[in-house]
Amino acid sequence: MKRSRTSKSWMNEHVNDNYVKQAHSDGYRSRAAYKLIEANQKFKLLSKNMIVVDLGSSPGSWSQAAGNIIGSQGKIFALDILEMQPIRNVTFIKGDFREELVLHTLENKLGDLKVDLVISDMAPNISGIKTKDQAGIIHLNELALDFSKNWMKPNGSLLVKSFVGGQYEDFIGEVRKAFNRVVTFKPKSSRDRSSEIFILGQKMKNVG
Ligand SMILES: C[S@@+](CC[C@H](N)C(=O)[O-])C[C@H]1O[C@@H](n2cnc3c(N)ncnc32)[C@H](O)[C@@H]1O
């Protein structure tokens, strides 16, 4: 089949992208690793022995990057609709985070553990209908925030990918109610044409 101009230009951009090249040489499964690495350099999110929940984890570069920092005494619980090839010290759950049963599977795996850091790179499949895509990501953002409220240690942090627009400002308001420090962040490794933005809540308030 003949390649369309769009897929050719995507391929050109992909192979010429320095982060893609860097990911190959550093052994990361995706260039997305550098978004978390950059966030960590800037905000000191990760440290040894942490318990991390990675939502929307496949193909696995955030789990790889986080695992390198938290070490073998730390634990990562990763979840995605898509399959993920195993990574040492990472417990993977395959399923849709919007489903109650999938949430319960994650909760059962956590057992008595409380979480230091929740990272969510989840995004719905883009339909091109802006209001629908926006509502879809805010729904995922809210689920990640609800999960954090129930499972996070006091002083824990949430890093969540969102898109500006729609209910985005309302969602940030919700994050502010739950965390003492809230910032937004666009990593250098995030493509310019992408409207993604990361919201970071640090120091979970003790609401109990
Ligand atoms: C940008 S990718 C994540 C890349 C990942 N952070 C990495 O570094 O390899 C977004 C992921 O979110 C997942 N996703 C989207 N909606 C989801 C949902 N409702 N439940 C679980 N995973 C979801 C997708 O399947 C996709 O793998």
Image (spheres, rainbow, N blue to C red):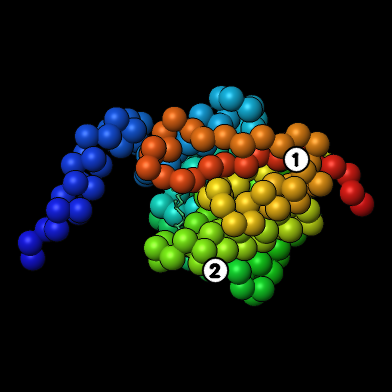
Give coordinates of residue 159: x percent, y percent: 62, 43
Instruction: Work out whether residue 76 can be spotted.
Output: no
- Label number found at residue 156: 1
- Label number found at residue 96: 2
Q: In this view of the protein, which residue sits in the foreground, 86 or 179?
A: 179
Q: Residues within 10 Å of mark 2 (few under 14, many from 20)?
A: some
In terms of image quadrants, where is residue 67? top right
Give coordinates of residue 94: x percent, y percent: 51, 66
Q: Amino acid at mark 2?
A: Asp
Tag 1 secondary structure: strand
Look at 61% across and 37% down and name the residue there.
184
Instruction: Work out whether residue 45 can be spotted.
Output: yes
Look at 43% across and 57% down and name the residue there.
84
Give coordinates of residue 65: x percent, y percent: 49, 37
Which quadrant, please, contains the N terminus? bottom left
The yes-or-no answer for disc 1 within 8 Å of ligand 1 is no
